[in-house]
Image (cartoon, grey):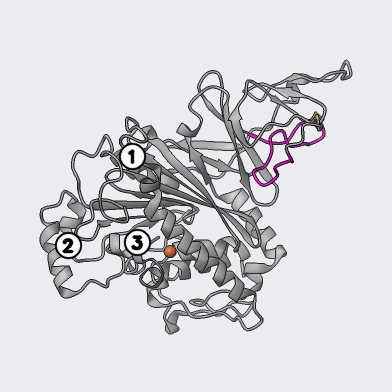
Amino acid sequence: MLRANAPSDVKPAIAGAVASTGESTRKTYSNGWREGTTIPAEYYLDAKHYNTDERYIAENLWLMADHVNRIPKAGDYFVFEFGRAESVIILRNTSGEIKAYHNVCRHRGSRLCRHREDPRPDDPRLSVLQLGSSGNTPVFRCPYHAWTYDLDGNLISAHNMQKDFDMAKNGLIPCHMRIAEGHIFLNFSREKKPPKFDTEEVEYLRKMGQKYGLADLKIAVRQYYPIKANWKLAIENFLECYHCGSSHRNLVTTHNWDDNLSPDQKARLLREMTTWACEEAKEKAGEAQGMGSGGSSWATEYSGELNPGFLTGSVDGKPVAPLLPRIKKWTHCTDLATTAHSTGYWQAYDDHVAVARFTPRAPEFTDCEIFWLVNPKAVEGKDYEPERVMSLWDITIREDIWIVENNHLGVTSRAYGPGRYAEHEGSPARFIKWYMDEVVKA
Ligand code: FES
Ligand SMILES: [Fe+2]
């Protein structure tokens, strides 16, 4: 959720991107779309455009899947799903390494593990054995003909095969994977060489990772939020805070993101900030905080202050967990980082970090999952309650899902036509321009 007055500070790093959405620089594209406006409904709704989107993302973006601490022990695994067909098993092998393999049997292509949305009825009369979408296992055994793979993807059992069948050539297909600051990223390209996973892609995440010690934090709680809307509507919404004042009372009560403070509140904020440990807020008190962007992934960052009386990103402003190990005192500040057009999003506070991912699944369906990281020494029930840790962003994402699904319904109407982005919607306007230039190539 990028603050309302920040988009004007974002420098587009995409080649040829035009920062302004003003009339003088607006360009009309071959399909009639005008820069600075939302796109025609077909780009949100049609399967043909969604197929293009999915292919582009698979080949060009690194999607954040989860945190390595989700699978701490050998044999721990979970399934990550992308688009309509992709499914990857992410596991920890016996040497402690994280590995990613396509969830596709090399025999006749069955899924080895189940999809989250594909639960079979629990009927003891059925004898098919299939692993669930997460758990712990010494091997992956296909439910169809029982070909079995070890934790390094090697095929270790395939009964009654021909003499010339080469087990060594029938291991699971690896998926491109990188790890940054304890977070697992996947790329679905079938090329041998994946796109660059360079400092631009994760530059801001790395900075945040060092400051908050992200790699060593513990997952306190996680929540899955299915969104019945096109992925671009979900991302556009998360790229702007024009809607924060009208849709996120709790969020703008906590964060100074609405620019709705009275002169008295502003004066108090400025006085208080001079005593805080947030260096950036002290230096730039009262001004828009810097938000950068860079590289083809258009990653962003932001640092800023919380509102007076708020120590952390909680509904009541009180701490929700002990300070993170690398944070020595309360700073009243928050840091934000994103990767890959905000499909990965980190919001860090002194005592916890909220991590969100947005993953396209179908033209009208997007996965959102949020997990909350806390001090690894914190004990549930004693040092933190999961409900309190998650409360602010749980409320915020439920509000976002409401407005995004509602937006999708409106876009579906025959009365919908492209509308003009406001000045504070510079980020979604640039995201959509990038989409038309790079993905649609309009
Ligand atoms: S499809 Fe997996 S063993 Fe046959
Ligand atoms: Fe929002």
Q: Give x and y (percent) for residue 280.
A: 20, 54
Q: Which mark is residue 251?
A: 3
Which three-letter amino acid code belongs to the residue tagged 3?
Answer: Leu
> Which residue matches tag 1?
384
In this rendering, position of residue 429 left or right of residue 78: left
Q: Nearer the viewer, mark 1 or mark 3?
A: 1
Figure check: 209 above or below 17: above
For label 3, being within 8 Å of ligand 2 is answered yes
Q: Give x and y (percent) for residue 150.
A: 66, 21
Tell me the residue at 46%/50% (across/down).
356
Q: Are marks 2 and 3 in contact (CB under 8 Å)?
A: no
Figure check: 299 above or below 122: below
Magenta residues (range): 100-121
Which three-letter amino acid code belongs to the residue tagged 1?
Answer: Tyr
What crowding class fits label 1: few (fewer than 14 Cα within 10 Å), some (14-19), or many (20 or more)? some
> Which residue matches tag 2?
285
Tell me the residue at 66%/53% (across/down).
55
**Labels 2 and 3: the sequence-earlier one:** 3
Element type at mark 1 = loop
In this rendering, position of residue 41 left or right of residue 270: right
Residue most extreme to the top: 163
Q: Main secondary structure of the magenta part?
A: loop
